Amino acid sequence: QVQLVESGGGLVQAGGSLRLSCVASGRTFSRYVMGWFRQAPGKEREFVAVVSWTGERTYYADSVKGRFTISRDNAKNTVYLQMNSLKPEDTAVYYCAADYNTRGRIGRTATDFGSWGQGTQVTVSS
């Protein structure tokens, strides 16, 4: 399994921006579909964004579409989540997730992903 370490969370005012990073260990990063999920207190973990092996295909939750951008740098074993126009309802712990598969399947549910980071807190004040 790949080890994932997130960073970049913090406190920001509504309308501000943050960029999350997730660094993965291992030599087969390019064969992992990478995703971001989030979990607010008292709520289920929810899908935020996912990116294909090469970064050519991306998918987003409706709630973040147009504000968040997922990208990856396979040379650095890193996936990013650029978050703009943040809202208080974006407040959550954000988790990086990895799905190793050889078919290029792009999952969008938590059960599709076998490896998870420890999470990074994002707090958006109004």
Image (cartoon, helix red, strand yellow):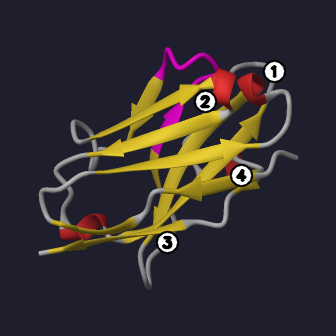
Classed neighbour count for the residue bearing mark 3: other residues with Cα under 10 Å, few (<14), some (14–19), many (≥20): few
Region of the chain picked out in magenta, as a range? 49-57
- Total label count? 4
Local SS, label 2: loop
103 relative to 109, above or below: above
**Residue sitting at 18 percent across and 62 percent down?**
87
**Residue sitting at 24 percent across and 51 percent down?**
17
27 relative to 15, above or below: above
Q: Identity of the amino acid at label 3?
A: Glu
Q: What residue is pinned by disc 3? A: 44
Q: How far separated are the C-alphas under marks 4 and 1?
A: 20 Å
* In magenta stretch: residue 52: yes
Q: Quadrant of residue 121?
A: bottom left
Q: Identity of the amino acid at label 2?
A: Ile
Q: Identity of the amino acid at label 4?
A: Leu
Tell me the number on the disc at residue 102. Answer: 1
Q: Identity of the amino acid at label 1?
A: Thr
User: Where does residue 99 sit, x and y in percent of width and height?
Assistant: 73, 39
**Would residue 105 be seen by someone viewing this image from the given angle?**
no
Which one is earlier in the sequence, the residue at label 2 or at label 4?
4
Q: How far separated are the C-alphas under marks 1 and 3?
A: 29 Å
Tell me the number on the disc at residue 106. Answer: 2
Please state which of the two labelled residues, at mark 3 or mark 4, is closer to the viewer: 4
Q: What residue is pinned by disc 4? A: 4
